[in-house]
């Protein structure tokens, strides 16, 4: 096996027309390009010790993992946005979303929560989504730009999201106090549902960074009003939240009040 590279970019089999695009993308996001020739994708996993392989294509992007393929989709965002139009959901209430807010989604993943948040901010609002995995960040960036969303409101929400490939702790270290109105974390791999095949594919290419006390301190400095953390209801954690907003039977959002919000304003 060659020197292990967790992420790679290659072309389809006999896909010489895609080589230039693949090489340009690889250089832009800092992931090695590997020629495919006619090799099965499984050979590239074995040869390079890869966890995720982006196969360049003129169609919608797909990342191959040993657990199967991963493509961008809107997930439950459309249904949640529709419900929020009549009454704000638990996430919107936890973040105290207001028109024009600037929100940091510090754990972007596939961007479902970011879409829900952005839909609640109005045209003047914005979401910055952090994703430490370069392949996953690129997949979501392409999806936000090109996916054919069914409701127009979701397409508008997607246009308010900016993706940044960075770890949340590194990014927050550079933030000035009060840079965002709210900061959101979903430490999804602290309690993964093993039966979920889509979650297992996502796990293969995600960066498994724990939510540390240091990250929370930095987030509370960066947020003007609130920091919200998604937690399972039976294990809300050690962090000592100021408030907790249940969402269904299994999860909820713990909230730290920051700045003026902590003073009741």
Image (cartoon, helix red, strand yellow):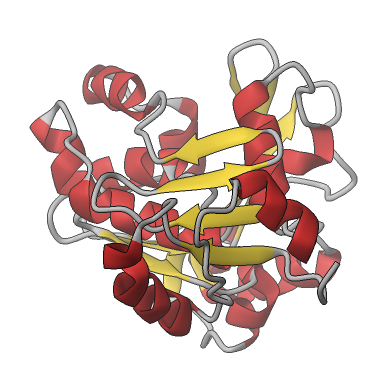
Q: Is residue 69 above or below residue 18?
A: above
Residue at 22% across / 42% down in the picture?
147
Q: Position of residue 128 (x, y in %)?
A: 40, 65
Q: Nearer the viewer, residue 8 or 184?
A: 8
Q: Identify the residue at image location x=71%, y=40%.
A: 66
User: What is the x, y in percent for residue 132?
Assistant: 61, 67
Q: Nearer the viewer, residue 205 or 17?
A: 17
Seen at 67% across and 57% down, the residue is 44
Q: Classify 58 as above or below 259.
A: above
Q: Position of residue 168 (x, y in %)?
A: 63, 69
Q: Quadrant of residue 262?
A: bottom right
Q: Is residue 149 left or right of residue 83?
A: left
Residue 185, given in percent of the width and then of the height, sits at 62, 51
The residue that appears at 63% across and 41% down in the rendered structure is 202
Q: Is residue 255 left or right of residue 163?
A: right
Between 38 and 56, which is closer to the camera in this rendering?
38
**Which quadrant would residue 87 be assigned to in this image?**
top left
């Amino acid at each position: 096996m060659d020197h292990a590279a967790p992420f790679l970019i290659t072309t389809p089999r006999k896909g010489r027309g895609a080589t230039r695009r693949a090489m340009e993308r690889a250089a832009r996001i800092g992931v090695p390009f590997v020629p495919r020739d006619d090799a099965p994708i499984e050979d590239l996993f074995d040869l390079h010790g890869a966890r995720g392989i982006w196969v360049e294509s003129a169609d919608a992007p797909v990342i191959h993992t040993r657990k199967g393929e991963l493509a961008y989709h809107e997930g439950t965002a459309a249904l949640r946005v529709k419900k929020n139009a009549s009454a704000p959901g638990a996430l919107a209430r936890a973040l105290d979303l207001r028109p024009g807010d600037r929100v940091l989604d510090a754990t972007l993943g596939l961007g479902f929560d970011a879409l829900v948040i952005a839909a609640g901010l109005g045209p003047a609002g914005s979401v910055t989504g952090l994703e430490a995995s370069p392949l996953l960040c690129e997949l979501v960036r392409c999806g936000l730009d090109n996916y054919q969303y069914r409701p127009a409101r979701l397409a508008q929400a997607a246009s308010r999201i900016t993706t940044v490939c960075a770890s949340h702790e590194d990014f927050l270290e550079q933030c000035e106090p009060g840079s965002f109105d709210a900061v959101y974390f979903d430490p999804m791999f602290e309690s993964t549902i093993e039966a979920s095949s889509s979650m297992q594919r996502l796990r293969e290419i995600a960066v498994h960074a724990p939510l540390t006390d240091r990250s929370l301190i930095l987030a509370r400095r960066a947020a003007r009003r609130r920091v919200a953390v998604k937690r399972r209801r039976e294990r809300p954690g050690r962090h000592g939240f100021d408030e907790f907003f249940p969402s269904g039977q299994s999860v909820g959002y713990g909230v730290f009040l920051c700045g003026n919000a902590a003073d009741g304003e």
